[in-house]
Amino acid sequence: MFGWFGKRDDEAAPLDEGLWESATLPYLFMRGMPPADNERLRQLASRFLARKQFASTHGLEITPFMHVQVAAQAVILVLELGLEWYDGWSDIIVYPGQFVPEREVVDENGIVHVVNDPLAGEAWLGGPVILSYEDVALAGDEQARVAGYNVVIHEFAHKLDMLSGEPNGCPPLHKGMSLAAWKDAFSGAYGDFCRRVDEADAKAGADGGAELDELPIDPYAAESPSEFFAVVSEAFFETPEWLEPAYPALYGQLREFYKQDPMARLAAT
Ligand SMILES: [Zn+2]
C-alpha cells in the first residue's frame, strides 16, 4: 500500500546502469535479451526493490550489488506479467549460506519426526522469501555454475504457484489458456521425469551417479508437482535448450504462462 510516507514504486529511481550490467551479465537468462527488454527488466527491478524489504541474518551485509542480483533474478519471471504477481507480502530474508530450520513432520503412523535438512531457499504462503546468499551467487558464478540452478527463480516460481493457494504446480492461468492442456503437459512430463529419475537412481550405484547428471533438469524436480513447477521454471529461463527438446509441450505451456520465449532469444544470439 502506498501511504503518504511511502515512496511510490513508479517513481523508484532506476538502478545504476553500470551496477545493473555487472550484476546481470553472467546470468544465463540474459542471453539474447534485446536491449529494450533489458531496459524494461532494469526498470522493473528498480520498482521491485522499492516495494520489497530486505533483512539479513548472522550479520550479513546486503550490498547494492546483492540487491540487484536478487531483484534481477526475481523479476525475470514477471517481465510480461507485472509486479502485482508478487503482491501480498514484502519481506526477503537473506542468510549468508544454507540454513537449517527445525521442522516437525508427522508420518503416516502418527509419529512426529524432527527434520533438519539444510535449505538453499524457502517461500512461505503469504510470507517471506528466504534465500541463502551463497546459493543466490552460484547462478552468476562461472566457476561454480551448475547450469540451470537458480534458487531465486525457484523460490519466486513457488510464489506464483501460491497465488492459487497451497502450491500444487499450477499457478493461476491466463484467459485463453486451457487448464486441461496445462495439466496434460505437466502430468505427462512429471510422470516421465519421475520414471527417469527412478531409473537413473537404480543405475547410479553402478556408475557413480553419471545417469543423474544426464537428466535435462535437476532431479529434485521429482519431489512433488510444486517442486517440478519451480525446477522447470528455472530450466525455462536458464537452460531452455535442454528443457524444450525434452518436454516440448511443457515448454509451450510455460511460454504461454510467462509470455516469454527464451528459446527464441537464444536463437537470435
Ligand atoms: Zn522448492
Image (spheres, rainbow, N blue to C red):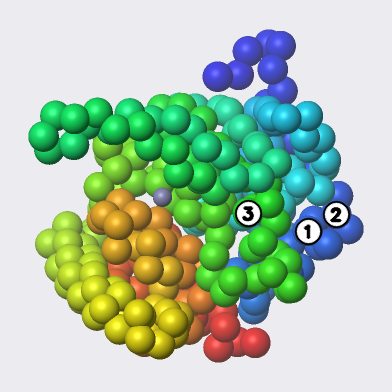
Above-or-below relation of 62 to 239: above
Above-or-below relation of 169 to 46: below
- The answer to whether the residues at label 1 and label 2 have Cβ atoms under 8 Å apart is yes
Q: CA distance from mark 1 to mark 2?
A: 6 Å
Asked if the beta carbon under badge 1 is closer than 8 A to the nearest atom of ligand 1, the reply is no
Q: CA distance from mark 1 to mark 3?
A: 15 Å
Quadrant showing the N terminus: top right
Question: Picture quarter containing residue 178?
Answer: bottom left
Q: Which residue is mark 3?
A: 135
Asked if the beta carbon under badge 3 is closer than 8 A to the nearest atom of ligand 1, the reply is no
Above-or-below relation of 232 to 157: below
Mark linked to residue 23 = 1
> What amino acid is labelled 3 in the image?
Asp
> Whole-percent x and y of residue 255?
39, 69
Q: Which residue is mark 2?
A: 19
At x 60% / y 87%, what residue is drawn?
268
- 10 Å neighbourhood of mark 2: few (<14), some, or many (≥20)? few
